[in-house]
Amino acid sequence: MTSQPLESRGLDRARDDRPAPDAGDSILIVDDEPEMLSFIERALAPHFARVETAADAGTARTLARDLHFDLMIVDIRLQGSESGLALAREIRDRHQVDLDVIFVTGYADVYDESDALRDASADVLRKPFLADQLLAMIQRARERRRAAREQALIQREHDRRPVAKRIVGESESLKEIWRTIHRLAPMPSTVLIKGETGTGKELVARALHDLSGRRGSYVPVNCGAISADLIEGELFGHLRGSFTGAHQARNGLFSHADGGTLFLDEIGEMPLPLQAKLLRVLEERRYRPVGGNQEIPINARVIAATNRDLAAEVLAGRFRKDLYYRINVVDLRVPPLRERRGDIPFLAGYFLNVLSTELGVPNAALSPWDLEQLMGYDWPGNCRELRNVIERSLLLGKPVAHLLCVTPPQAPGASESDLGSAGPASLEQVQRAHILSALAAAGGNRTVAARALGVSRKTVERKLKEWSQPDDVSVAD
């Protein structure tokens, strides 16, 4: 080893008074060169709560088993047949999945292992290096981890929001869906959710899981988004060496959903050969990883969803009849938005409130003309399309009616918010638009809207009942 990393200026600059990367962290250093091990330890000891060293992989395994570490600095090539890459993966998998890793190496051909390094999600520092270089790399690694942790917290907070806060509306058909969800949630039976794209099928699936009492994870998978060559391995996992490129064993989604729920979205896209294997898993409650000989028992509830007519797909020979009957124990239909127009103001107000917060832009009230156009549009993309229109409106600062390519009628001296078609608006049109606008501004809260309008809640409810379709429902993506 050269003397450059041990120059006093390298250590002196590492001991200055600047803030430490994260003084509460604990670090494990693994290197079979005594001088390098000592250099890194002395460079980092003033900055971190604990710095442990290991001159070989066995000592590192023992330390990782007994102590928690936030960061591991490891030489890529250790003595003997041990690999720093393999050691880092092993410690991550067995003990510390959130462990950050920085690899050090003195070999110029390290980039021959670039695929493995990318898989390890780690940084590489070439020897010789200064203490400052190492501290800067540690700082970057910690900042990435903090950002990832913050994003995970945001996502968890979103996922923890009660399902009732994300399924918006008070119509009779929505109440019927909720009654069905509560009745089916504790049961282990398979449920098939039917509906057009964007109607909110996954929210229904998530509600079934959240109310089931199952302690395992909710694991969604879009069967149409994974190629036919990969979907079997994604669902059932594979053993090491089971196919070209399978350098290590991998658990499948069925394994991750054990004790919980596996949501198979767009199951109509599943290839026919895999449909037969899925049928066997559903009937026997056991699966076999790709390349494996032994079957593994599974306790995962399966919920499927489709935007296709599976009965027609069966007749056309594109979907197995036996699998169709097996997953269609109970079916739950989510109607398209055009069949539940009375809930559009509730959804529009909800999306305005949520998206204005997420985007950091001012909330915007919907004009009576905007609401009329929203109510009159057919929404082929359903709730997802409505959300996208609201988001574009907030981003561009344009009325939603303009984004629907609808031009509001203009009479001489009339403002854009005036109602009208070919002639003056009827009293009923004006009243309807005014009430719907108040509801949207109140985020769908009828009591708040009624107070703003100066009428009773019963008056608002009576009017909504007059305007609603019999099968209205409001489920939002």
Image: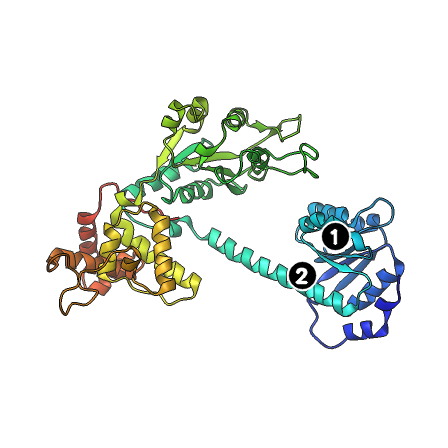
Q: Is residue 48 visible?
A: no
- Which image quarter is the N terminus in? bottom right
Q: How many marks?
A: 2
Label 2 packing within 10 angstroms: few (<14), some (14-19), many (20+): some
Is 18 rendered above or below residue 100?
A: below
Q: Nearer the viewer, residue 97 or 405?
A: 405
For the residues bearing labels 2 and 1, Cβ distance under 8 angstroms: no
Q: Name the N-terminal-most of marks 2 and 1.
A: 1
Under mark 1, the amino acid is: Tyr
- Color scheme of the displayed model: rainbow
Front tag of 2 and 1 = 1
- In the displayed structure, does residue 237 sit left or right of residue 459? right
Q: Which residue is mark 1?
A: 111
Q: Which mark, by number, is residue 96?
A: none
Q: Which mark, by number, is residue 141?
A: 2
Residue at the spot 50% in from the left edge and 34% down from the top edge: 301
Label 1 packing within 10 angstroms: few (<14), some (14-19), many (20+): few
Residue at the spot 69% in from the left edge and 48% down from the top edge: 115
Q: Nearer the viewer, residue 431 or 373?
A: 373
Under mark 2, the amino acid is: Ala
Tag 2, which secondary structure?
Answer: helix
Q: Position of residue 338 (x, y in %)?
A: 27, 45
Dividing the picture into quadrants, the one containing residue 145 is bottom right
- In the displayed structure, does residue 194 sit left or right of residue 93? left
Residue lying at the far bottom of the rendered structure? 17
Residue at the spot 26% in from the left edge and 56% down from the top edge: 446
Q: Nearer the viewer, residue 289 or 63?
A: 289
Q: Is residue 284 visible?
A: yes
Is 202 rendered above or below residue 436?
A: above
Q: Report, in whole angstroms, how far the alpha carbon at label 2 lies from the one at label 1.
A: 20 Å
